[in-house]
Amino acid sequence: MAYVALYRAYRPQKFAEVVGQQHIIKTLQNAIKLNKVAHAYLFCGPRGTGKTTLAKIMAKALNCENGTSIEPCCECEVCKGISKGMISDVVEIDAASNNGVEDVRALRDTVKFLPSSGRYKVYIIDEVHMLSTAAFNALLKTLEEPPAHVVFILATTEPYKLPNTILSRCQRFDFQSISIKDILTRLKIVAKEENIEITEEALYQIANSAEGGMRDALSLFDQCISYSVNPTISLDDVLAVSGNISYQKIIELLDACISKEETNAIKILDGILKEGKEVPRVVNDIILFLRDLLLFKNNAFLEKKLMFENENFISLSKKITKDIIYKWLDILNDALNQMRFSTQKRAYLELAILKMNDNEQNDFINLSNRLEALEYAFSQINTNQIKTPKVETYVPPIPTIEEISNIVEDTPKNIEVKEQNIVEIKENIEQVSNEFITVKDVEKILNNGSREMRAKLNEIWQNASFNKIIDRYTSNNFTIQMLFNGNVVASSKDAFIVVLQDAGFCNKVMLYQNYTRIIEMFSELGLEIKDYICLPKQTWQKILADWKSKYSDSNPTPILEDFAINVKKRVIPSIKEEIKKDEEFEKINELFGDDIKILEE
């Protein structure tokens, strides 16, 4: 007897055996159970996800000799005949090769005849998007009002190619890509039934390479069985058959790039290409790996837990920052686009790897991270400690007030030290100890609301683009432009609240250097604004709901429920500006190095 491919041998025969698509299975079974079977169904989705399989199971469930049920028996002659394609009442048509109007007319002529052995005549039209326009038009009337004993099931991978007149006459079901977990479960069952030994890593690679298609997974498994000469199918066997690159090779390549070892990186790439890997496939595999790396760094493990537990993968993730990953993705995407119009694909890949080793580019990204970290550290100064952000680059420590005092005490006698300045410095540091906006701050503005001021502010917001004063302040300052992209939601006589999209924008607008410019701008506009608060949209909605529920004529100043608001208060004049007043700043400058000068500029 001829060998039967695995995807045919293990094709599901019942609804319960189908992997995934539970939302579709449940709907079809309920339709059968409630006797509400539609006259036309459209199954659409990626290849190998069970469209034709479910169509045949539906046909068996409708025509089973043991009666219409939500699960066919698969034992009667009708069920067996449908599985073997020997029942004339179930007609499977390949629209790719029978796409003419004459083929549809022939189908239309047979529709009127009653079924010979079952209760329904089921027409399964596969790849229905391949029908010609004339064929679609010929099918319209029959599809809309077929005889009571006829059910049409149309299957396609490209539903957007179908005319709207066809789509509107069918119940549409969108099949989803099958998860890696479900594919792995099915592959283990097949391996056990076939007595095949295969490693966990090899099974995972097959499931990952299938890209959500069960048929692709079983076909690749079939190839690996034929390819492997060892008792156990290994990861190398799967990689050789599929043409993919092992994650270990990609880790070695990227590790060489981040370590700026251009020669080693090119040698590793040459070894990969000598194994016969296609250049575009290499680029795609690296891009997918970088995507997984980003997911891991954002704690989005998804389905690839096996890879995320790899020690080499974790080690590499600690070396590479997100900014470098984004830069590398741009380089690789650009190389992939260039390859489409060139025969020298390898040259573009090698140039991309060399660009990824570019010392200046990587150093620039690290410098940007370092400056952002240092700027953030300045804003977090308080009386006891410096709160440094979690960044992946080294940040020089910022001196505490005790260290500043020690520096002053150790200065030479010929430098005059003013104790009053040190007291002023301490006072300024103490002013920023409470660094986040609180509900009390918002409550104060709400309970002292001024409709007149809010009307003035709304008028300014509406005409902001035509105001020369505002234009002068926003022309070179994107952060102040953010302020006018928000909405004024509340105002007192000398303060207001603006709602922006998220906390990141709010923190930018609340920075002290922006605060002084904004207050100065309102002063020129003739308003005595002394303060403002920026809130994320969701935070404001929560506060507003609480205020509305508690406000009444008898309680015009309600006390609101307190919770954390992740927006920093404006930083009151920085410590650096006060220290500059004295000559001892030169001493402190030695601790900060050139970083203060960069921030100063």
Image: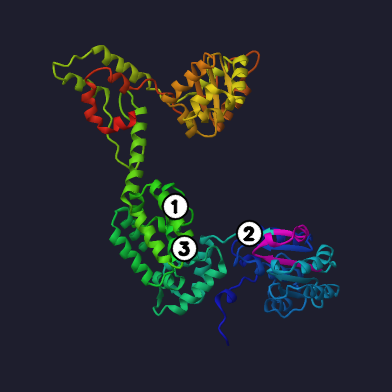
Residue depicted at x 42% and y 78%: 228
Which of discs 2 and 1 lies nearer the camera? The answer is 1
In the depicted view, which residue is nearer to us: 403 or 259?
A: 259
Quadrant of residue 379 within the rendered picture: top left
Crowding near the residue tagged with mark 3, few <14, some 14–19, many ≥20 C-alpha atoms within 10 Å: some
Which residue in the protein does label 1 denote?
330
Q: Do the numbered discs 2 and 1 sit on residues whose CB atoms are within 8 Å?
A: no
User: What segment is highlighted magenta in the picture?
Assistant: 150-172
Instruction: Where is residue 272? Give x, y as percent.
Output: 37, 68
Three-letter amino acid code of the residue under disc 2: Gln
Relative horizontal placement of residue 426, taking residue 536 as reference (left or right):
left
Q: Do the numbered discs 3 and 2 sit on residues whose CB atoms are within 8 Å?
A: no
Q: Secondary structure beneath disc 3?
A: helix
Image vertical order of residue 574 relative to residue 526, above or below = below
Residue 454, visible in the rendered structure: yes
Mark 1 / mark 3, whichever is N-terminal? 1
Residue depicted at x 62% and y 70%: 12
Instruction: Where is residue 247? Give x, y as percent.
Output: 39, 62
